[in-house]
Image: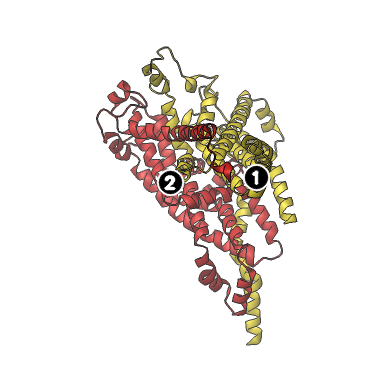
Chain colours: A red, B yellow
């Protein structure tokens, strides 16, 4: 016990060193956010006369306004607002459908196992490691054959299909931990397949549902590959629009508008992270460690 | 009546679960395995603008393996991948160990370290593209600080551009690695550490001899995940450098996208996609295998 009270100068120095390093690390992670924010409130003259770390000389919202409704993303010059809407329209149904299907799948794969269900789960698990490049060429052909022209519809379908392995994984891994006595009791009481699922299982799955919703929201909102391959023109999601804005604009480069647009594209997932951080981290570790 | 209810419950027990799983099974069977087969088939054809399905042998692979740009992309992936993985592992572990010292504001710090993971790689790429801007970015900052002769033009320098991808990638993913290691550290049995302390082992010794070796499984999974992120890397480079200057930051994923979708070289795109699959498989197979073995035992 005496040891733990003996605070030598050396130990104090070591503690200070630890805090100093943690502080520096925090600065390194925060610096880009700081630069993005300050740049977005600067005028172009201000950007040229100042530097990355200098504060805006005069606080201006012009770049934000331009980024939202008049910045040019290629030939279109309507800002990010319609693409923001596209991403929302694609994300909401895709997240809800993939979560619902995933929870049902997890339910079957943990409590209604049948011959081959474990093999199926394995097959699904392997899918989490696929580089999507290996499926996008055929998918483009199939979407063409189906005659699905609408970008949002295409992206919802694709995101549901390639999100299922994760959503199923989350729920299956949670449901295998639910005591089997509960299942047996419910079956003896005559609770049917869906009754048991909706009345008993779903209410105790709220944390897993949160993990799944947050995971899917971040994945789908942040996706770029599917967006750039399967959508076109004014149906593109915000990540594609942002990339177009930053990398194809002609004339004077408006760095402040780029930064405002980037923050707009980042806001929804940042918000989700701040509000549901606990579930976000749990999803990352669960989704990552197991698959 | 009894017969009816019997067959109904049989339906619920046997058929209904399969009906529920059917859409996913179909999606998985067609969307994963069917499409991999399809891509494989395309890679053995002479498809250009449109897919053709006549067997053409290994022409696309011959072309791919004779393509300098492909090898440049693979080399870049090797450089980027190994640096990205090594730095993320080292920095993530270091951060996790620091945070594990009963730190006062641990929650807040963790939130700060991990937020980049919530961002799209496109946002990260856009931010770093601006920070690394040769005229107005870090270079200007160094000039303003008095280092008037300093140049920092890595992002437009063919020899150094790939390192800017490493910087941005590390910035985005380190917090995630930290979170995984921290979870691992918290899972270690305290009594072993206490016993070592009683034996008079110093903190660095406890970490290097006891704690870090016991994190072996975490190392394995973190390595697999980072390798997987590296192989798939696409958006970050598209936003940061677009693969340039020249092909200095080109990656297999960009090669695949451009040949398969914008240059009308379907067959070559398919062949490169297959090579990406093999690369990912080579990295991931050992991991899956060990997981499978653990499931068997457990």
Q: Quadrant of residue A201?
A: bottom right
Q: Residue B36 at what x, y percent from top left?
A: 65, 45
Q: Identify the residue at image location x=62%, y=44%.
A: A130
- Marks 2 and 1 in Cβ contact (< 8 Å): no
Q: Residue A115 at what x, y percent from top left?
A: 71, 64
Q: Is residue B278 left or right of residue A143?
A: right
From the viewer's side, name the closer residue of A149 and B12. Answer: B12
Q: Residue A27 at what x, y percent from top left?
A: 44, 33
Badge 1: residue crowd in 10 Å (few <14, some 14–19, many ≥20): some
From the viewer's side, name the closer residue of A257 and A278. Answer: A278
Q: Examine the rendering and report whether any part of residue A78 can be seen.
A: no
* Residue denoted by label 2: A269
Q: Examine the rendering and report whether any part of residue B97 can be seen.
A: yes
Q: Residue A283 at what x, y percent from top left?
A: 53, 51
- CA distance for labels 2 and 1: 39 Å
| Tag 2 secondary structure | helix
From the viewer's side, name the closer residue of B64 and B92. Answer: B92
Co-location on one chain, circles 2 and 1: no
Subunit under mark 2: A
Q: Identify the residue at image location x=55%, y=61%.
A: A103
Subunit under mark 1: B
* Residue denoted by label 1: B193
* Residue B285, placed above or below residue A254: below
């Amino acid at each position: 016990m005496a040891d733990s009270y003996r605070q030598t100068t050396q130990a104090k120095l070591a503690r200070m060193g630890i805090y100093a390093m943690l502080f520096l690390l925090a600065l390194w992670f925060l610096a880009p956010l700081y630069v993005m924010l300050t740049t977005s409130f600067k005028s172009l003259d201000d950007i040229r006369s100042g530097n990355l770390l200098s504060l805006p000389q005069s606080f201006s919202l012009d770049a934000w306004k331009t980024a939202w409704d008049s910045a040019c993303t290629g030939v279109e010059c309507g800002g990010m607002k319609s693409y923001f809407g596209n991403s929302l329209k694609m994300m909401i149904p895709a997240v809800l459908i993939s979560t619902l299907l995933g929870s049902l799948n997890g339910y079957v794969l943990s409590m209604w196992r049948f011959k081959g269900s474990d093999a199926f789960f394995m097959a699904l698990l392997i899918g989490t490691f696929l580089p999507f490049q290996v499926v996008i060429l055929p998918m483009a052909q199939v979407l063409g054959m189906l005659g699905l022209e609408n970008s949002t519809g295409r992206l919802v379908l694709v995101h549901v299909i390639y999100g299922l392995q994760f959503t199923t994984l989350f729920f299956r891994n949670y449901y295998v931990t639910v005591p089997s006595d509960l299942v047996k009791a419910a079956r003896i009481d005559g609770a049917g397949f869906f009754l048991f699922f909706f009345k008993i299982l779903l209410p105790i799955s709220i944390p897993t549902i949160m993990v799944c919703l947050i995971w899917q929201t971040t994945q789908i909102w942040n996706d770029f590959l599917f967006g750039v391959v399967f959508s076109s023109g004014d149906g593109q999601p915000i990540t594609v629009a942002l990339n177009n804005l930053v990398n194809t604009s002609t004339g004077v480069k408006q760095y402040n508008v780029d930064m405002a647009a980037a923050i707009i594209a980042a806001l929804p997932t940042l918000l989700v992270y701040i509000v549901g951080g606990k579930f976000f981290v749990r999803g990352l570790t669960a989704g990552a460690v197991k698959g | 009546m009894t017969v009816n209810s019997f067959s109904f419950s049989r339906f619920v027990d046997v058929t209904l679960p399969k009906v529920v799983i059917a859409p996913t099974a179909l999606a998985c069977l067609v969307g994963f395995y069917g499409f991999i087969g399809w891509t494989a088939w395309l890679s053995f054809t002479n498809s250009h603008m449109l897919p053709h399905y006549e067997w053409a042998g290994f022409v696309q692979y011959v072309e791919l393996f004779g393509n300098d740009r492909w090898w440049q992309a693979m080399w870049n992936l090797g450089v980027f991948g190994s640096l990205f993985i090594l730095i993320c592992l080292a920095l993530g572990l270091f951060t996790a160990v620091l945070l594990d010292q009963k730190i006062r504001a641990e929650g807040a710090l963790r939130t700060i370290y991990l937020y980049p993971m919530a961002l799209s790689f496109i946002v990260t790429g856009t931010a770093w593209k601006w920070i690394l801007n040769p005229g107005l970015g870090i270079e200007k900052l160094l000039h303003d600080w008095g280092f008037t002769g300093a140049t920092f033009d890595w992002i437009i320098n063919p020899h150094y551009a790939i390192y800017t991808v490493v910087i941005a990638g590390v910035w985005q993913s380190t917090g995630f690695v930290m979170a995984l290691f921290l979870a691992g550290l918290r899972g270690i049995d305290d009594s072993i550490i206490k016993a070592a302390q009683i034996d008079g082992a110093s903190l660095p010794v406890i970490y290097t001899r006891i704690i870090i070796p016991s994190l072996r499984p975490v190392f394995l999974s973190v390595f697999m995940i980072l390798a997987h992120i590296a192989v798939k890397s696409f958006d970050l480079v598209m936003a940061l450098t677009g693969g340039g200057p020249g092909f200095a930051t080109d990656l297999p994923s960009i090669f695949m996208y451009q040949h398969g979708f914008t240059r009308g070289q379907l067959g070559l795109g398919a062949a490169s996609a297959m090579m990406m699959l093999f690369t990912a498989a080579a990295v991931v197979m050992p991991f899956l295998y060990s997981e499978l073995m653990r499931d068997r035992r457990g």
